[in-house]
Amino acid sequence: MVIKELVAKEKETIIAWRRQIHQHPELGFQEHKTGQLVGDLLEEFGYEVQRGIGGTGVVGILKPKGMEHKRAVALRADMDALTVTEENQVPYASKNPGVMHACGHDGHTAMLLGAAKVLSQLRDQLSAPIVVLFQPAEERLGGARAVLADGFFHQYSIGEIFGLHLWPQVPKGKVGLKVGPVMAGSIDFKLKVLGQQAHASEPHNSIDTIVAGAAIVGALQAISSRFINPLESVVVSVGTFHAGEISNVIPGEALLSGTARTASQNVYKQLPALLERVIESTARTYGARVELEIVEGYPVTASCAESVATVEQVTREALGEEGLFRLDSCRMASEDFSYYLQEVPGAYFFLGLGNERKLHQPTFDFDEELLAVGAEILARTALAASKRQDSHGPCRN
């Protein structure tokens, strides 16, 4: 039986899984019920199951006889939800106040469960082991790092990895992908500007942290306009600025935080030093000093040419040429899937939702008919990639 028919038989079940997960969202490293559901289903499908990887992650392993020596193909889905209060009036709305699957991770988990079930029925067609990874804590907590720290790639001899994200800025039902940078690298920064408090009528007796902080905000924009090659993409944004309590006092302290993002791994490596240089030198100009904390977020997520070609091939088989949407640029959001692609070749790609609803919003939802599409693409990708694991070399972009 062909993959499309197998997925069609499971479509309503996949939707039911998604709704169950959506009703019971869990934050990063708290995905206990979700992980329990996933692990139990994988065991039911005939997978070897490891629970607790990376804290609350779950791994399923499908090893065809005689293929144990080959490198495995991995498929990854993220399971965590967000601190968002759902506003959708639907029967499957979140029952966990203040927590919601507003980024589609419930869909990712359901799609990968569907693909895993289909692949278990195609065991005799596999040419390499298949590993399905249900990862915790993608949202800002870096669950991928915890998974890697638990020896995921070495333990299962992963040769290639694929990840799929539901995405509004791709036409509905199309698969969006590109070779090279797909998601930006991110660096967060926090700073305390320290000066001298004074009455507003005596600015000469102050070291004004609002003026110094405002100057820092402006100076940071020079990173993209004057310190980085204009052909490279980079954005620096200050998201918070808190200072003072009353209108007639110049505050002696200001707190700022922000983020820098780039599609270039080379620029990503330069950013910490540039941020420190611009922030500290600008503060000194105004007589202030700073306490600066720079936290590297997720590196650039870059897909490999050969892995992208596999996804293109299976998309044509499933949806025809019209099902492909070639991305013309890197998305400036970031993803911890990047850590996996620093270890082995692979591809990160999108399944389009259209522009009806935005990610991370209390009204986020999507057409559940897309779940079967995603499950089919994932299953086909694993099957196709398994046929060339012995010949797959380093990433080529």
Image (cartoon, grey):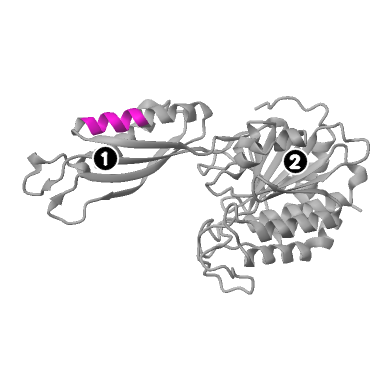
Q: Residue at x 56, y 59 (%)?
A: 102
Instruction: Tell us which disc is closer to us: 1 or 2.
Output: 1
**Residue 185: horizontal and vertical position, in percent?**
51, 36
Q: Is residue 122 visible?
A: yes
Q: In this rendered view, identify the residue nearer to me: 389 or 200.
A: 200
Q: In this rendered view, identify the residue nearer to me: 141 or 16.
A: 141
- Magenta part of the protein: which range? 276-284
* Secondary structure type for disc 1: strand
* Secondary structure type for disc 2: strand
**Residue 231: horizontal and vertical position, in percent?**
46, 28
Labels 1 & 2 near each other (Cβ < 8 A): no
Alpha carbon separation for disc pair 1 and 2: 46 Å
Taking the view exactly as shown, the residue that stands out farthest to the left is 201
The residue indicated by pointer 2 is 74
Amino acid under label 2? Ala
The residue indicated by pointer 1 is 193
